[in-house]
Image (tube, coloured by chain):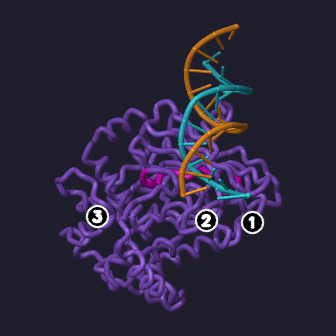
Chain colours: A purple, B cyan, C orange
Amino acid sequence: MAAEQGKRSKLSAPTYPTITLPPRPPIDGLFQSGSGLSPGPMTLVSAFFSDPDSTNRSFSQLLAGAMASPGAKLPYNPMDDSFMEVGFENGGEKNSGFKQNRPLNLGVGNSPWFTVPPGLSPSGLLNSPGLFCLSPQSPFGISHQQALAQVTAQAALVQSHVHAQPEYQTLSAATSSEPSIPPSSANPEETLQRMLSSDPQSSAMECLEASQFDKKSQPCVAVDKPAEDGYNWRKYGQKQIKGCEYPRSYYKCTHPSCPVKKIVERSAEGLITEIIYKSTHNHEKPPPNKQPKGGSDGNANLQGNLELGSLVVAGNSNNLSEGKNHESTQPVELPGFSDCEEGCDEESREERDDDEPNRKRRQVLNQFVIGLGNL
DNA sequence: AGCCTTTGACCAGCG
DNA sequence: TCGCTGGTCAAAGGC
């Protein structure tokens, strides 16, 4: 294992991408409440709506801002069949690789990131009752259908691109030649209209209506679902890692003879910061009726919140036929979810972590995203 | 009954 | 060689 750790460190040391944080004024205003407490997702959403800085920004604007922002991409995670927004910057020197890959400060950055958690499909996110229970027509200024359409369309773009490139396994960086998702139209509403016309999601509102009724009374609680990726996982171990407040969890794919494992790491705040995949699925995803119920996978039992940190993929589930060895792992950071920006070393990260307001901001936004994804 | 998580023990690599 | 550390095993219990 130390060997593995060593490998990871070597492989991910100085060259893997880091993140550039685009301006993020509207979100910052969200965290100005002086309570110091982390509100629940819905509380946060309410705060979002009532915040003076955000009242003039529609949800579509926020989405468009995220998508159009220079670092924003929606990399497709072949293991999870999901998309995440990822932004990169060119290789800031990092001193030791693996552990360097911490999420960027949420609150410190300035971009209205709207992040789809790993394993949570955009449609899943937007279909979630937690999002739709806000109101049929969101105060953001666009309908949930529109939001769904936009995210789904963006996701589809990435998916088609990634699927065309089976070698893709480490969530390409800006430093690579991989084309990124083109920014949304300068006019987000126009973009939405185009997407709506091409990507009808009529079921979304049906789901909304049903879920509103069925789950209205359910608490908006963030549960730990590291990656709802369509595969079934069995937790086979948990280890307290030195220097980490929270244990690292080890999962195996439950498919017979499938060698895939994943390691879920947490930040000091108990939030997931890294999901490391090892090896390659030698099977297709289980059919939907054999997948975990309720949008959960085998990890649903973990406690705590979901933070979107970095995703490390060792191996390529789409690259089944080639039987390549998948020793390499390459962490990929998600913008707005890392404690560390370019050139940030351990020392400066600790300094950031000491920044209590920023830490709380991160927690709040994390919960926001988590809430949307899990409700 | 089957599958899951939990958790302590064990093992191997590294300094 | 030894202690530390991380990864895995496997028994126990829960759902």
For the point 46% across and 50% down, the residue is A303
Q: Which mark is residue A167?
A: none
For the point 59% across and 71% down, the residue is A158
* Residue situated in front as seen by the camera: A296 or A196: A296
> What is the three-letter code of the residue carrying label 1?
Glu
Can residue A352 be seen from the camera position used here?
yes
> What is the three-letter code of the residue carrying label 2?
Pro
Label 2, secondary structure: give it.
loop
Identify the subunit bearing mark 2: A
Left or right of residue A124, residue A64 in this image: left
- Image location (x, y in percent) of residue A341: 41, 47
How crowded pointer 2 is (Cα within 10 Å; few <14, some 14-19, many 20+) is rated as many
Q: Which residues are magenta?
A: A304-315
The residue identified by callout 2 is: A292
> What is the three-letter code of the residue carrying label 3?
Leu
Q: Which mark is residue A284?
A: 1
